[in-house]
Image (cartoon, helix red, strand yellow):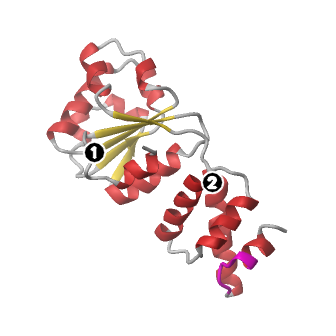
Amino acid sequence: MDALRYLMQWPQWNTSGLVIYGNSGVGKTHLAGLWAQTAGATFLLKPNLDYDPRTIFDANCNFVIDDFDAFLAEKKDSWIFHFFNIAVEKKRSFLLLSRSNPSLWRIELQDLRSRLLTLVAINMRDPQDELLFKIAQKLSRDLEITVSDDAIRCLINLVERNVSAVSAALRILDKMALRMQKNITVQFVKRCVGA
């Protein structure tokens, strides 16, 4: 199962959390941002490790921890363990983004390790055209950009094949189309991006 499809199944996940892992630049953070908008989630940063994890649950939201490897490097297993348990208790969802497979995580607290290994973990490889197409469709809907499927496919063929490049190109095309009062068609994409 791919990451986008699983994220779109929220809130009907089998567990409270999901792990998406893969190399830098494959689009993990971008997908997490899209999910955060849908799920009302906030991104947790390393400074949160200095506070009682219960306090972050005062806000009624779900959570994303980007670069979970950096959280693990802080050796705050107890904090992460409590975060996990509180999330389950309060029925909150969370998304962990990592560069490495969870089976390779170095976790000293065995109770935490066993809990994290119960989460669904999806390896996100370099995005293929079909995944980029789905991400671009969702991004254009979220940003209320009117663009045809054919124009999206054309765009993917003209820009670097990664989420950041497609996202940036869509935003630029939207601004250009608004300024020129044109629709984003295949011809418009070819003229603006192809040039």
Q: Regarding mark 2 in the picture, which secondary structure is present there?
A: helix
Residue visible at 51% across and 43% down? 28
When asked about the image quadrant of residue 166, the answer is bottom right
Q: Which quadrant does the C terminus fall into?
A: bottom right
Residue type marked 2: Asp
Which residue was labeled with disc 1? 93
**Residue 187, x across and y down, in percent:** 75, 78
Q: CA distance from mark 1 to mark 2?
A: 29 Å
Residue visible at 45% across and 51% down? 4
**Lower position in the chain sequence, tag 1 or tag 2:** 1
Q: Is residue 20 visible?
A: yes
Query: What crowding class fits label 2: few (fewer than 14 Cα within 10 Å), some (14-19), or many (20 or more)?
Result: some
Residue type marked 1: Ser
Q: Regarding mark 1 in the picture, which secondary structure is present there?
A: loop
Residue sticking out furthest to the left: 89
In-image side of 164 versus 71 (left or right): right
Q: Viewer-proximal residue, 156 or 107?
A: 156
Query: What crowding class fits label 1: few (fewer than 14 Cα within 10 Å), some (14-19), or many (20 or more)?
Result: many
Residue visible at 52% across and 63% down? 139
Q: Is residue 52 visible?
A: no
> Magenta segment, which residues?
182-187
**Residue 120, x across and y down, in percent:** 34, 35
Which residue was labeled with disc 2? 129
Establish if 56 lies above or below 148: above
Q: Viewer-proximal residue, 91 or 118?
A: 118
